[in-house]
Image: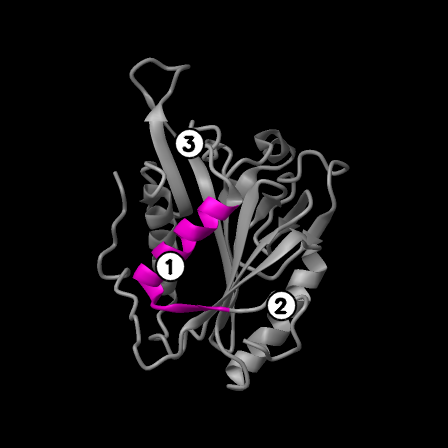
Amino acid sequence: MSDPRPEACDHPRLATLPPVGWAESRGRVAYPEAVTFMERRAAEIHARTAGEIVWLVEHPPLYTAGPATRKGDLLDPGRFPVFETRRGGQLTYHGPGQRVAYVMLDVGRRGGDVRAFVCALERWIVGTLAAFGVTGETRAGRVGVWIARPDPARPGAVREDKIAAIGVRLKRWVSLHGIALNVSPDLGHFGGIVPCGIADHGVTSLDELGRPATLEAVDKALRASFEQVFGPTADAPDPLRATSGAS
Protein backbone atom coordinates (compact mmCIF):
# COMPACT_ATOMS: atom_id res chain seq x y z
CA MET A 1 0.00 0.00 0.00
CA SER A 2 1.00 3.61 -0.43
CA ASP A 3 2.46 5.44 2.53
CA PRO A 4 0.50 8.73 2.51
CA ARG A 5 1.90 10.08 5.79
CA PRO A 6 -0.65 12.94 5.82
CA GLU A 7 0.87 14.62 8.83
CA ALA A 8 4.26 14.75 7.10
CA CYS A 9 2.95 15.96 3.75
CA ASP A 10 1.54 19.26 4.97
CA HIS A 11 4.27 21.34 3.37
CA PRO A 12 3.44 25.07 3.52
CA ARG A 13 2.94 27.02 0.31
CA LEU A 14 3.91 30.44 1.61
CA ALA A 15 2.43 33.41 -0.22
CA THR A 16 4.99 35.67 1.45
CA LEU A 17 7.89 34.13 -0.51
CA PRO A 18 8.74 35.29 -4.04
CA PRO A 19 8.18 32.84 -6.91
CA VAL A 20 10.82 30.14 -7.18
CA GLY A 21 13.17 30.56 -10.13
CA TRP A 22 12.74 27.86 -12.80
CA ALA A 23 15.83 27.28 -14.93
CA GLU A 24 17.14 24.74 -17.41
CA SER A 25 20.56 24.00 -18.86
CA ARG A 26 20.58 22.48 -22.32
CA GLY A 27 23.18 19.90 -23.21
CA ARG A 28 25.00 17.63 -20.77
CA VAL A 29 26.10 19.24 -17.51
CA ALA A 30 29.21 17.92 -15.77
CA TYR A 31 28.45 16.80 -12.21
CA PRO A 32 31.23 18.84 -10.51
CA GLU A 33 29.97 21.94 -12.32
CA ALA A 34 26.49 21.34 -10.98
CA VAL A 35 27.73 20.91 -7.42
CA THR A 36 29.78 24.11 -7.63
CA PHE A 37 26.72 26.10 -8.65
CA MET A 38 24.50 24.53 -5.98
CA GLU A 39 26.96 25.28 -3.21
CA ARG A 40 27.29 28.89 -4.29
CA ARG A 41 23.58 29.42 -4.79
CA ALA A 42 22.67 27.84 -1.45
CA ALA A 43 25.03 30.24 0.29
CA GLU A 44 23.44 33.16 -1.56
CA ILE A 45 19.94 32.01 -0.63
CA HIS A 46 20.97 31.76 3.01
CA ALA A 47 22.42 35.26 2.83
CA ARG A 48 19.21 36.51 1.12
CA THR A 49 21.23 37.78 -1.86
CA ALA A 50 19.58 35.40 -4.35
CA GLY A 51 16.24 33.68 -4.65
CA GLU A 52 15.23 30.05 -4.49
CA ILE A 53 15.63 28.08 -7.69
CA VAL A 54 14.85 24.76 -9.36
CA TRP A 55 17.45 23.82 -11.95
CA LEU A 56 16.72 21.16 -14.59
CA VAL A 57 19.73 19.34 -16.03
CA GLU A 58 20.78 16.23 -17.90
CA HIS A 59 24.10 14.61 -17.03
CA PRO A 60 26.47 12.44 -19.04
CA PRO A 61 26.55 8.83 -17.77
CA LEU A 62 27.91 8.72 -14.22
CA TYR A 63 27.36 7.32 -10.76
CA THR A 64 27.12 9.35 -7.56
CA ALA A 65 27.84 7.83 -4.16
CA GLY A 66 26.22 9.29 -1.06
CA PRO A 67 27.72 8.89 2.43
CA ALA A 68 25.56 5.82 3.15
CA THR A 69 27.04 3.86 0.22
CA ARG A 70 28.13 0.39 1.29
CA LYS A 71 31.11 -1.59 0.15
CA GLY A 72 29.96 -3.84 -2.66
CA ASP A 73 27.19 -1.55 -3.95
CA LEU A 74 29.39 -0.61 -6.91
CA LEU A 75 29.17 -3.74 -9.04
CA ASP A 76 31.03 -2.50 -12.13
CA PRO A 77 33.70 0.00 -11.00
CA GLY A 78 35.06 0.69 -14.47
CA ARG A 79 31.81 1.42 -16.27
CA PHE A 80 31.35 5.14 -15.53
CA PRO A 81 32.97 7.84 -13.39
CA VAL A 82 31.95 7.74 -9.73
CA PHE A 83 31.53 11.00 -7.83
CA GLU A 84 31.34 11.11 -4.06
CA THR A 85 28.55 13.42 -2.97
CA ARG A 86 27.25 14.79 0.31
CA ARG A 87 23.56 14.38 -0.54
CA GLY A 88 21.56 11.80 1.36
CA GLY A 89 21.35 8.24 0.16
CA GLN A 90 23.67 5.74 -1.47
CA LEU A 91 24.66 4.97 -5.05
CA THR A 92 22.60 6.11 -8.01
CA TYR A 93 22.97 6.55 -11.74
CA HIS A 94 22.54 9.76 -13.74
CA GLY A 95 22.65 9.97 -17.51
CA PRO A 96 20.96 10.86 -20.79
CA GLY A 97 17.20 10.44 -20.80
CA GLN A 98 16.92 11.14 -17.10
CA ARG A 99 15.63 14.49 -15.88
CA VAL A 100 17.50 15.71 -12.82
CA ALA A 101 15.95 18.62 -10.95
CA TYR A 102 18.21 20.33 -8.45
CA VAL A 103 16.11 22.05 -5.81
CA MET A 104 17.55 24.96 -3.86
CA LEU A 105 14.82 26.04 -1.46
CA ASP A 106 14.90 27.79 1.90
CA VAL A 107 13.46 24.93 3.93
CA GLY A 108 13.91 26.94 7.12
CA ARG A 109 11.57 29.65 5.90
CA ARG A 110 9.21 26.97 4.59
CA GLY A 111 8.52 25.45 7.98
CA GLY A 112 11.81 23.80 8.92
CA ASP A 113 10.39 20.27 8.71
CA VAL A 114 12.76 17.96 6.83
CA ARG A 115 10.35 15.03 6.78
CA ALA A 116 7.60 17.21 5.33
CA PHE A 117 10.02 18.55 2.74
CA VAL A 118 11.01 15.08 1.50
CA CYS A 119 7.37 14.02 1.44
CA ALA A 120 6.55 17.13 -0.60
CA LEU A 121 9.24 16.17 -3.11
CA GLU A 122 7.59 12.77 -3.44
CA ARG A 123 4.19 14.39 -3.97
CA TRP A 124 5.73 16.58 -6.66
CA ILE A 125 6.95 13.51 -8.54
CA VAL A 126 3.67 11.63 -8.09
CA GLY A 127 1.77 14.60 -9.54
CA THR A 128 4.16 14.76 -12.47
CA LEU A 129 3.71 11.09 -13.29
CA ALA A 130 -0.06 11.44 -13.14
CA ALA A 131 0.13 13.78 -16.14
CA PHE A 132 1.31 10.77 -18.17
CA GLY A 133 -1.25 8.33 -16.79
CA VAL A 134 1.25 6.70 -14.46
CA THR A 135 0.46 5.97 -10.81
CA GLY A 136 3.48 6.67 -8.66
CA GLU A 137 3.48 5.47 -5.06
CA THR A 138 5.59 5.96 -1.95
CA ARG A 139 6.72 3.37 0.55
CA ALA A 140 7.60 3.62 4.22
CA GLY A 141 11.33 3.24 4.69
CA ARG A 142 12.07 3.68 0.97
CA VAL A 143 12.52 7.27 -0.17
CA GLY A 144 11.59 7.89 -3.78
CA VAL A 145 8.65 7.02 -6.00
CA TRP A 146 7.72 3.50 -7.03
CA ILE A 147 5.61 1.74 -9.64
CA ALA A 148 3.64 -1.36 -8.60
CA ARG A 149 2.71 -3.75 -11.41
CA PRO A 150 2.21 -7.47 -12.11
CA ASP A 151 5.38 -9.53 -12.01
CA PRO A 152 5.59 -11.64 -15.20
CA ALA A 153 8.04 -14.00 -13.51
CA ARG A 154 5.61 -14.77 -10.67
CA PRO A 155 1.98 -15.13 -11.73
CA GLY A 156 -0.32 -13.31 -9.34
CA ALA A 157 2.52 -11.44 -7.68
CA VAL A 158 3.28 -7.72 -7.79
CA ARG A 159 6.70 -6.19 -8.28
CA GLU A 160 7.79 -2.67 -7.41
CA ASP A 161 10.25 -0.72 -9.53
CA LYS A 162 11.72 2.68 -8.78
CA ILE A 163 11.02 5.42 -11.31
CA ALA A 164 12.38 8.41 -9.41
CA ALA A 165 15.07 8.89 -6.81
CA ILE A 166 15.37 11.61 -4.18
CA GLY A 167 18.61 12.69 -2.57
CA VAL A 168 18.87 15.96 -0.70
CA ARG A 169 21.16 17.76 1.67
CA LEU A 170 20.42 20.76 3.87
CA LYS A 171 23.08 23.38 4.44
CA ARG A 172 22.02 26.07 6.91
CA TRP A 173 18.43 25.04 6.13
CA VAL A 174 18.81 25.53 2.37
CA SER A 175 18.35 22.40 0.26
CA LEU A 176 20.83 21.13 -2.30
CA HIS A 177 20.54 18.28 -4.82
CA GLY A 178 17.01 17.04 -5.45
CA ILE A 179 15.26 14.46 -7.64
CA ALA A 180 16.01 12.26 -10.66
CA LEU A 181 13.11 11.07 -12.81
CA ASN A 182 13.66 8.29 -15.33
CA VAL A 183 12.16 9.38 -18.64
CA SER A 184 14.02 7.28 -21.22
CA PRO A 185 17.48 6.38 -19.87
CA ASP A 186 19.32 3.18 -20.68
CA LEU A 187 18.09 1.16 -17.69
CA GLY A 188 20.93 -1.30 -18.22
CA HIS A 189 23.30 1.25 -16.72
CA PHE A 190 21.67 0.74 -13.32
CA GLY A 191 23.09 -2.77 -13.51
CA GLY A 192 26.51 -1.44 -12.55
CA ILE A 193 25.31 -0.59 -9.04
CA VAL A 194 22.89 -1.61 -6.33
CA PRO A 195 20.60 1.41 -6.82
CA CYS A 196 20.12 3.28 -3.54
CA GLY A 197 21.31 0.15 -1.74
CA ILE A 198 18.10 -1.74 -2.53
CA ALA A 199 18.74 -5.05 -4.26
CA ASP A 200 15.23 -6.52 -4.03
CA HIS A 201 13.59 -4.09 -6.48
CA GLY A 202 14.23 -2.93 -10.01
CA VAL A 203 14.10 0.37 -11.86
CA THR A 204 11.78 1.58 -14.58
CA SER A 205 11.08 4.64 -16.70
CA LEU A 206 8.23 6.33 -18.51
CA ASP A 207 9.52 4.81 -21.74
CA GLU A 208 9.73 1.29 -20.30
CA LEU A 209 6.18 1.66 -18.96
CA GLY A 210 4.89 2.44 -22.44
CA ARG A 211 4.47 6.16 -21.73
CA PRO A 212 7.18 7.69 -23.94
CA ALA A 213 7.66 11.41 -23.42
CA THR A 214 10.12 14.11 -24.39
CA LEU A 215 12.11 15.92 -21.73
CA GLU A 216 10.25 19.07 -22.74
CA ALA A 217 6.89 17.45 -21.97
CA VAL A 218 8.21 16.15 -18.66
CA ASP A 219 9.55 19.59 -17.78
CA LYS A 220 6.12 21.11 -18.35
CA ALA A 221 4.50 18.51 -16.10
CA LEU A 222 7.21 18.95 -13.46
CA ARG A 223 6.60 22.67 -13.33
CA ALA A 224 2.82 22.35 -13.06
CA SER A 225 3.08 19.77 -10.27
CA PHE A 226 5.78 21.75 -8.44
CA GLU A 227 3.52 24.80 -8.34
CA GLN A 228 0.70 22.71 -6.89
CA VAL A 229 2.96 21.53 -4.06
CA PHE A 230 5.38 24.40 -3.41
CA GLY A 231 3.85 27.51 -4.96
CA PRO A 232 4.46 29.74 -7.99
CA THR A 233 7.55 29.78 -10.19
CA ALA A 234 9.12 32.34 -12.50
CA ASP A 235 11.40 31.84 -15.52
CA ALA A 236 15.09 32.07 -14.64
CA PRO A 237 18.19 32.09 -16.87
CA ASP A 238 20.47 29.11 -17.34
CA PRO A 239 22.69 29.15 -14.21
CA LEU A 240 25.74 28.21 -16.26
CA ARG A 241 25.34 31.33 -18.39
CA ALA A 242 23.94 33.75 -15.82
CA THR A 243 26.00 35.88 -13.51
CA SER A 244 26.31 34.80 -9.89
CA GLY A 245 23.29 35.80 -7.88
CA ALA A 246 20.91 36.16 -10.82
CA SER A 247 17.49 34.67 -10.26
Mark 2 or mark 3, which has the lower sequence index?
A: 3
Count of all numbered marks drawn on residues in the image: 3
Q: Name the foreground residue: 176 vs 22.
A: 22
Disc 1 designates what residue? 226
* Three-letter code, disc 2: Pro
Mark 1 or mark 2, which has the lower sequence index?
A: 1
Q: Magenta segment, which residues?
A: 216-235
Residue drawn at (70%, 62%), measured in percent from left and top? 33
Residue 151 versus residue 63 in the image, above or below = above
Residue 80 screen position, x and y as percent: 73, 41
* Three-letter code, disc 1: Phe
Image-based side of 44 in relation to 161, left or right:
right
User: Dot 1 lies on which element?
Assistant: helix
Image-based side of 163 in relation to 59, left or right:
left
- Dot 2 crowding, Cα within 10 Å, few <14, some 14–19, many 20+: many
Q: Name the foreground residue: 100 vs 242.
A: 242
* Three-letter code, disc 3: Arg
Residue drawn at (42%, 47%), measured in percent from left and top? 144
Q: Does the magenta stretch include residue 231?
A: yes
Disc 2 designates what residue? 239
Residue 189 in which image quadrant:
top right
Q: Do the residues labelled 2 and 3 touch (CB within 8 Å)?
A: no
Residue 115 versus residue 181 in the image, above or below = below
**Res. 137 in view:** no
Residue 61 in which image quadrant:
top right
Label ID, residue 211: 3
- Report the colour scheme: one colour
Quarter of the figure with the C terminus: bottom right
Residue 78 in which image quadrant:
top right
